[in-house]
Amino acid sequence: MATATAPVPHTGIAGLVRGLMRRPAVGKLLLLAVVAAVLVPVVHARWASGAWPDALTVDLSGPLGSASDWIIDNRDSHPLFLYFFGHISNAVTLSVRAVYLVLLAVGWAGVTAAAGLVAWRVAGVRLALGTAVAFLVCGLLGMWVPTMQTLALMVVAVVASVVLGALLGLAAGLSDRMYRALRPVLDTMQVLPAFAYLLPVVLVFGIGVPAAVLATVVYAAPPMARLTALGLRGADEGVMEAVDSLGATARQRLLTARLPLARKELLLGLNQTIMMALSMAVIASVIGAGGLGDRVYQALASVDVGAALAAGIPIVLLAVVLDRTTAAAGARLGASEPDHGALRGGRGWTAAAALTVVIALAGRFADRLEWPGAWTATIAEPVNNAVDWMTDHLYTGVPVVGGTADWAGHFTTWVLDPVRDGLQWLPWWSVLLIVAALAWLIGTWRTALTAVLAMAAIGVLGVWKPSLDTLSQVLAAVAVTLVLGVATGIAAARSARVDRMLRPVLDVFQTMPQFVYLIPVVALFGVGRAPAVAAAVVYALPAVVRITAQGLRQVDPGALESARSLGATSGQQLRQVQLPLARSALLLAVNQGVVLVLAVVIIGGLVGGGALGYDVVFGLAQGDLATGLVAGAAIVCLGLMLDRVTQPAERHAKKGA
Amino acid sequence: MRFRTRMTSLVAAGAALLALTGCGAADMTKQASPYANAQGAKTVTLSVQSWVGAQANVGVAKYLLEHELGHRVDTVQIDEVPAWDALSQGRVDAILEDWGHPDEEKRYVEDKKTIANAGELGVTGHIGWYVPTYFAEQHPDVTDWKNLNKYADELRTAESGGKGQLLDGSPSYVTNDKALVENLDLDFQVVFAGSEAAQITQIRQFAKQKKPFLTYWYEPQWLFEKVPMTEVKLPAYEEGCDADPEKVACAYPHTPLQKYLNADFAKTGGKAAEFLRNFTWTTEDQNEVSLMIADQKMSPEEAAKKWVEGHESTWKAWLPK
C-alpha cells in the first residue's frame, strides 16, 4: 500500500494517467464521475429527479392478472397441465406417499434403529447414538407423525435435488460453455430468499405437497450443481494425464477418475442441499407442505411459542444430525477406513440392515408401530411461562437501560426512519450511481453492471419505494449484525473456551426455523420494522460469527509470531495483523450477512416489516399474482444487487451456512 | 462398476415411477394429499385458517370425526383465498368457516361446480374498528369515527410516524382500511402487523400497560374476553356501499359464516360429509373452545375433548343417523 499512496511525482496528463493506473479505485470513481456528469443533466431534464419516474415503469398487473385467471381456468383441461405438470405433480405425490408409507410401516423403533445404524456406518458410534436419541426426542415431543411427514417430503426433495443438481453439475463440469452459462445462474440462485420462490410454484401446482417439494428442489439443487461442477473441474491434472495415457475412454475417465476425485465436493454438495431443503421445509408450510413446518406455522397462529418450539426442536435435531453425519462422511473419505474388525465394509452394512429388519419386525409383532401416546412430554407450558416472564419484565420500564419496547421505538425513530427517508429522498439516478461505485470498488465492472441493472429493474417494476424501505431495513440489520458478529467472532477466535461454548448455540440458531422466534420477537419489540430487523440479526449472526472466527484463526501464525516478537500488545496484534490479514474472510462475512439478513427481513412481513415482505405475504394470502410476483421479482433483484455490491473480486469457492 | 449399477437402478426407478403414473392424462386438480388414507384409514382433510376460531371449529370436528365416526383427520393451515383453490382441487375436503368471498364463490360454486355450499356455521361474523374499553370509558366520544382525529396524537407510535396508528392484521383478511382512512379524511396510518399472531401479541402488550390503541378486529374472537374492546362507529353499512374498493366509506357488514365442501367429497364423503353439513354451533360455543386453545394454551384436541364432554346434546344432533 505504501507505494500506492506515494505522491504523484509528475504533473500533467501523463502523470495523472500513471497515477490513476496505480490507484485503480480513484480511477474507477473518476470515470464514474465523468459518466455521471454527462448523463445526469440529460436524465434530470428528461424525467426529473426524486423517486423513480413513472414514465420508466411497466405496469404488469393487467397481464399477470389475466395469466393467473387463465391458469386457474385451464388447470383441469389444457394439455400442458394434463400431460406435463400433472405428471410431475403425480410423480411427486406418489413418491412422497411411498416413502411415508414405508416409514410408517417400519414403525418408530425401526426408523430410529435404521437412522442410528446408518450414522454408525458412515460416521461412527458417537454420532449413531446422537442420531438415535434425536429421533427418540422427536417422538417424545409428540411429533412422531409430523416428523415422518417432513422426512418423507425431505427424502423426495433431496433425492430430486441431488439428481437434478448432479446432472447440471456434470454438464457444467465437462463442458466449458455450459459452465460459463450456468455459473452466474447458480451463483445467483443461491442468494435468493426462499420466500420469493413460493408464489409462481403455487400458481401452477396449487397449494399442497407437490408445490412444496418443487419449491424446495428449486431452492436446494443449486449448491449440488455448483459443487459437482467445481469438483469435476478441480480434478488433479497429473492423475487425469495418467488415466489418459492408459488409454481410457471418455466414459472410463469420468467414472474411474473424475468422479472419485470429486467425492469430497459431491458430499459437501449433498450436505448443503440437505441443509437448504430442511430450511425450506418450514417456509414451504406456507404453501401446504404439512408436517413439522405446518405445526410451527399453526402454533404461530395461536401465539403459542412453546408449541412452535416443540415442532421446531425436531427440525433442529434433524438438521444437526444430518449435517454432522454427511460432514463426517466427507471427512472420513480422506482418512483410512476405520477398523470395525469383523464388521468391515459390506459386512457391516449387511449387519446394519439385518438389525433394522429385526427391530422393525419386532415392533410390528409387538403392535408398537405408532409412537405410544403415553410417552410424550409437553414442553409447551414451561416455555410459554418463560417467554411470558421475559416479556413481562423486559418489555418496558427496566431501570437505567429502558425496556426492549423503548429500544425498538428509538431504533425505529432514530435509525430506521432516517435511513429509509434518506434513501427515498435520494434522486433515483444517484442511487444507481452509488450502487455502481460500491460494486465496482469492491468487485469488477461486471458485478457493478449486474448490480446497477438489478437496481434499475426494481424501478422498472414500479416498486421503487417499498424496495428502498426493505433496503433500509437490510442496511440497519446488517450494521447491527456486523458489529455484534465481528465482536463475538473475535472473542471466539481468541479463546477456545468461548468458542466451545458458542458452538452449540450457533448450531441451534442457524437451523432453528425463523418462524419460531417471530412471536417472541414481537412480544419484545412490538409490531413493526424493529422486530423484523431483530429476527434478521438473530438469523444472520451465527454465520457472521463463524466466518469471522475462522478467518481470524487462519491468519498465518508466522505473521502473528513476528508481531509478538516486536512487542505488539494483543490489541495491536488484532488491529494491525489479524484483522487486515483476515480481510477476505471479513468481506465474505459481510456478503453472507447481507444475503441472510435479506431473507429474514422479507419474512419480517409477517410481523409488520411491511414493504416487499408484506407484498409477498399479501400475494400468497390473497392469491394475487400481480402484487406477489412483482414483489418477488423485486426481492430477487434486491438480493442480486446486494450480493454483487458486496462480492469481492475473487469469489471464494466455499460459502458458509 | 458400483457406480454403473447404481445408475441403472436409478433409471429403473425412474421408469417404474413413470409406469406407475401412467402415460395418459394426469389431472392434478383431482389429487389428494400424499398423507391421506395411509394404511387404509378413511381420511378427511380439513383446512384450518390462521385464526383461533377456525382452529376451534376444526378441533371439535376433528375430535368427533375421529372418536365418533372412526375417521382419520388431517389438518392443513392455508390462507383464505388459497384455501378455496385447494378445496376446488380436492387437496382439502372442507372449509368450515368462510367470511364471504364473492369472486371465488362465483368461480368455483356457480361456474366450475367443484365446490358445494354446506350451509351456515351458525356463527355471525363482524369486522370493525375497536378501541380498548378502558380507553373508551375515559373518552366516550372516541367511539364515533368523527372524533378519531382528536385522538390521533395519543395513538401515535414509532411505526406510524407523525399520524395515529390503525393496527391491521394479516394480509389474508378482508379489509378496506386504507381506503376508509383516505375517504373519511382521517389523520391515521394503517400499520399492517402481517399476521394475526403479531397483532394479538401487540394488542396484549398495549393492554398490559393500559395504553390506548385503535385496531382492526372482528367478532367472534376470544381476545375480547382478555382485552375488552369497544367498537368505533363507522358510517353505517348499506347494501353495495363497499362495491368499489377504492371508494369505500362505510362500515363492514355482518356476515353469516358459511361452510363449503369439495363437490366430489360432498357426494362420496358418506357419513363424514353429512356430519360436516350438520355441524352448526353458536358464537358462545366457539369462543369457549377458542379461549381454551389460545389463552389456556391447551392443544385444539384437548380443548375439543373438554367441550365435547360438556355439550353432548349439541353434538349428538350432528351425527348422521
Image (cartoon, coloured by chain):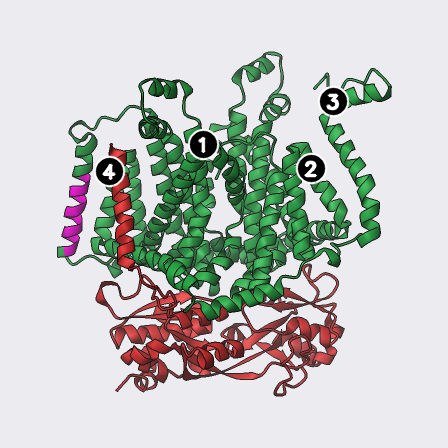
Chain colours: A green, B red
Pointer 4 chain: B
Q: Name the disc covering residue A21, or none.
A: 3
Do the residues under discs 2 and 4 have CB atoms within 8 angstroms?
A: no
Residue behind mark 4 = B5
Q: CA distance from mark 4 to mark 3?
A: 58 Å
Say which residue appears at 59% left-offset and 37% top-offset. Answer: A590
Q: Quadrant of the N terminus of chain B?
A: top left
Name the one closer to the observer, B291 or B235: B235
The type of residue carrying mark 3 is: Met
Q: Quadrant of residue A548?
A: top right
The type of residue carrying mark 2 is: Leu
The answer to whether A436 is drawn above or below residue A251 in the figure is below
The type of residue carrying mark 1 is: Leu
Say which residue appears at 60% left-offset and 24% top-offset. Answer: A574
| Residue A398 is inside the magenta segment | no
Mark 1 or 3, nearer chain start: 3
Pointer 1 chain: A
Mark 3 or 2, nearer chain start: 3
* Residue B247 image position (x, y, % from top left): 69, 77
Q: Describe residue A132's horizontal placement relative to residue A24 as left or right.
A: left
Magenta residues span: A352-364
Pointer 3 chain: A
Q: Nearer the viewer, mark 4 or mark 3?
A: 4
Q: Quadrant of the C terminus of chain B?
A: bottom left
